[in-house]
Image (cartoon, rainbow, N blue to C red):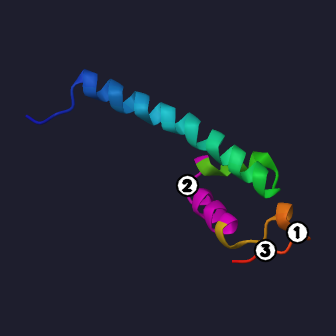
Amino acid sequence: MGGVGLPEALIIGLMGLILWVLVPICCWKIVRKTGYPAWWSLGALIPGVNVALLVMLAFGDWPALRGREVTE
C-alpha cells in the first residue's frame, strides 16, 4: 500500500541522474565566469563542499572582477 512502483522508481532515478549531470555543468559555467578554476565546480557533487562553494561564490571576491570598480 502506497509503495513506489517500477515506473515511479525509474522516473525518480532518471531525474536524479539528469540533475547529477546538469548541476556540475551549470556550476562549471558559473565558476569559470567568476575567474576561479572550472574544476572547482566538481565540488557541487560533494555534500558540504557544495554549500561552502556557494558561500564562497556569494560572498568572496571574484578574481575576474579584480581591478574593476564594482558597486554592490
Question: Mark 2 — residue?
Answer: 47
Please, which residue is most extreme toward the left here? 1
N-term-proximal mark, 2 vs 3:
2
Q: Is residue 21 left or right of residue 8?
A: right
Query: Image quarter for residue 3?
Result: top left
Front-most of 53 and 28? Answer: 28
Can residue 51 be found in the magenta stretch? Answer: yes
For marks 3 and 1, give the one nearer the viewer.
3
Secondary structure at numbered mark 2: loop
Secondary structure at numbered mark 3: loop
What is the three-letter code of the residue carrying label 1? Arg
- CA separation in Å, label 2 and label 3: 31 Å
Question: Mark 3 — residue?
Answer: 70
What is the three-letter code of the residue carrying label 2? Pro
Please, which residue is most extreme toward the right here? 67
Q: Is residue 62 left or right of residue 41?
A: right
Which residues make up the magenta segment?
A: 45-57
What is the three-letter code of the residue carrying label 3? Val
Question: Mark 1 — residue?
Answer: 66
Where is 30 relative to 64, above or below? Answer: above
**Majority secondary structure in the magenta region:** helix
Front-most of 57 and 64? Answer: 64
Secondary structure at numbered mark 1: loop
- CA separation in Å, label 1 and label 2: 30 Å
In the image, what residue occupies the spot 68% across and 64% down? 57
Does the CB distance between marks 2 and 3 fall below 8 Å? no
